[in-house]
Image (cartoon, helix red, strand yellow):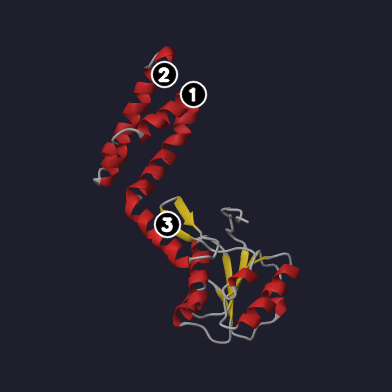
Amino acid sequence: MLPYPVFLNIAGCRCVVVGAGAVAQRKAQALLSSGAAVTVVAPVATPRVELLSVEGKLQWIAEAYQPAQLDGARLVFAATDDPELNQRVAADARARGALVNVAEPPEAGDFAVPATVKRGEICIAVSTGGASPALAKKLREQIEMVVGEEYGALVKLLGEMRAAVEQQVKAQNKRQQIYEAILSSDVLALLRDGKPDDARRRCLEIAKEVVAKPADETQ
């Protein structure tokens, strides 16, 4: 059975990571990058987790795990090196209505964290359902070679244009044609060459050209 893919908005949500080794550290940092309110539970933490705690970027509870530490959590990550403890954390998380990710054994969790490629506001996720993390990593590396940083710049540019286009171009089909024309143009190449101002001007030119066309020429 295939997993159900979804992107979660966890900004401001309490997320608890039980464990503070290298795996737990990666989980915590990824959660922080998504704006979560992160709590790490572990008697001993990595230097990086300690520093993030000192800087006030996450809460570190330097104690042995207790179920009450999961209260109010939206997501829970059982990331210790003790499979039995991880399964206990998973059961406690579900009892509180939280979704749980389990490092070991992964099948004990409710969701897997995919390999991701991020380019600005673009996020591409790759998962093999836990069957082969190595393959997921390889696919991610191949995507990274194809989808460069210019795509992040492009989505930012399109986002900046969107409000003006929505306000000034009332016909939905014209708006769609503007975006399609931009994506088929040299705008991406201009961004790849480090020419954002030229790319912005080109987008505006394309929008004006599409709007100026008679309806029978834009069908």
**Distance between mark 2 and mark 3 Cα atoms:** 35 Å
Could you say whether the residue bearing mark 3 is in a helix, strand or loop?
strand
Residue 58 at what x, y percent from top left?
Answer: 54, 72
Work out whether mark 2 precedes mark 1 in sequence or the reverse, and give the earlier one.
Answer: 1
Vertical side of 104 occupied by 207: above or below: above
Nearest-to-viewer mark from 1 and 3 = 3
Q: Quadrant of residue 80?
A: bottom right
- The residue depicted at 37 percent of the width and 43 percent of the height is 154
Judged left or right of residue 109, residue 213 is left
The quarter holding residue 88 reads: bottom right
Mark with earlier residue (1, 3):
3
Circles 2 and 3: CB atoms closer than 8 Å: no
Q: Residue at x 24, y 45 (%)?
A: 193
Disc 2 element: loop
Q: Residue at x 42, y 36 (%)?
A: 161
Decide: is 56 above or below 5. below
Q: Which residue is mark 1?
A: 173
Circle 2 is placed at which residue position? Answer: 218
**Image check: 121 left or right of 188?**
right
Up the image or down, 209 lies above or below 137; here it is above
Q: Are marks 2 and 1 in contact (CB under 8 Å)?
A: yes
Q: Amino acid at mark 2?
A: Thr
Q: Would you say 108 lies left or right of 142 here?
A: right
| Viewer-nearest residue: 143 or 98 | 143
Residue 219 in picture, x, y percent from top left: 44, 18
Question: Which label belongs to residue 117?
Answer: 3
The reply to whether residue 148 is visible in this rendering is: no
* Badge 1 element: helix
- The amino acid at mark 3 is Val
